[in-house]
Image (cartoon, rainbow, N blue to C red):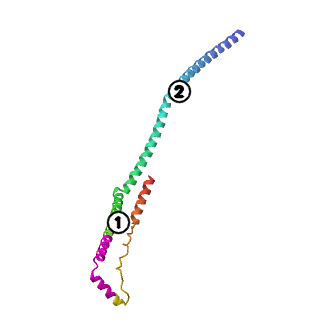
């Protein structure tokens, strides 16, 4: 009986051994497959790393281009608001003021020169009409006769007026350019 019992145990052991060997082969196949999968994933990762770096570089480049485009747009907007006509208009108004000042100065110099020349001509001529007129003034005023004709005073000083609107506009233009 013992042999029958031993034979049954041996059979059971062989069945278990066969089953265990099947499980072992299945697990080894899974291990090989997983090892192959890990190897493939690592290769794919190595291929993706340069693409990821390229994408980061491209992102940085796009950010820089966006910032540049935005700054350019703001500059164009500001320049558009300023308008070349308003800047040129300010310069034209300034030039006109300078021309007016130069004209006034030239006219004052001509008038002053003409007055002095005529006074010197009168003094040099020694006309009797002036002497007679001076005598009449003395009689009317009841004082002594003047010995010399009085010359007019120096010509009035030319005031250089500054237009505060032009100055303010120029300062505003400078400030806007500084902000750029």
Question: Quadrant of the image for the N terminus?
Answer: top right
Q: Which of the two discs, 2 and 1, sits closer to the camera?
A: 1
* Residue 70 image position (x, y, % from top left): 42, 48
Extreme-right residue of the structure = 2
Horizontal side of 168 relative to 113 (left or right) equals right
Label 2 sits on residue? 42
The residue lying at 67 percent from left, 12 percent from top is: 10
The residue lying at 48 percent from left, 28 percent from top is: 47
Q: Please say whether residue 3 is visible from this viewpoint.
A: yes
Q: Is residue 31 above or below residue 77?
A: above
Residue 54's label in the rendered image is none
Horizontal side of 15 relative to 82 (left or right) equals right
Q: Is residue 7 above or below residue 90?
A: above
The residue lying at 27 percent from left, 83 percent from top is: 129
Quadrant in the picture for residue 98: bottom left
* Residue 106 image position (x, y, % from top left): 32, 66
Label 1 sits on residue? 101
The residue lying at 45 percent from left, 46 percent from top is: 67
Numbered-mark total: 2
Extreme-top residue of the structure = 3
Distance from disc 2 to disc 1, alpha carbons, whole Å, reads 84 Å
Q: Is residue 133 magenta?
A: yes
């Amino acid at each position: 009986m013992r042999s029958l019992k031993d034979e049954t145990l041996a059979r059971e052991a062989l069945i278990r051994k066969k089953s265990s060997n099947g499980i072992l082969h299945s697990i080894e196949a899974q291990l090989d497959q997983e090892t192959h999968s890990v190897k493939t994933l690592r290769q794919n990762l190595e291929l993706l790393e340069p693409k990821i770096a390229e994408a980061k570089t491209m992102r940085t480049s796009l950010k820089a281009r966006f910032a540049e485009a935005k700054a350019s747009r703001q500059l164009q907007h500001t320049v558009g608001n300023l308008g070349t006509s308003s800047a040129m208009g300010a310069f034209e108004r300034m030039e006109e003021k300078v021309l007016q000042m130069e004209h006034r100065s030239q006219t004052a110099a001509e008038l002053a020169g003409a007055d002095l020349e005529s006074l010197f001509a009168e003094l040099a001529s020694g006309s009797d009409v002036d002497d007679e007129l001076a005598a009449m003034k003395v009689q009317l005023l009841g004082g002594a006769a003047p010995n010399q004709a009085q010359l007019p005073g120096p010509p009035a000083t030319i005031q250089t007026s500054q237009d505060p609107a032009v100055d303010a506009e120029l300062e505003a233009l400078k400030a806007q350019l500084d902000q750029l």
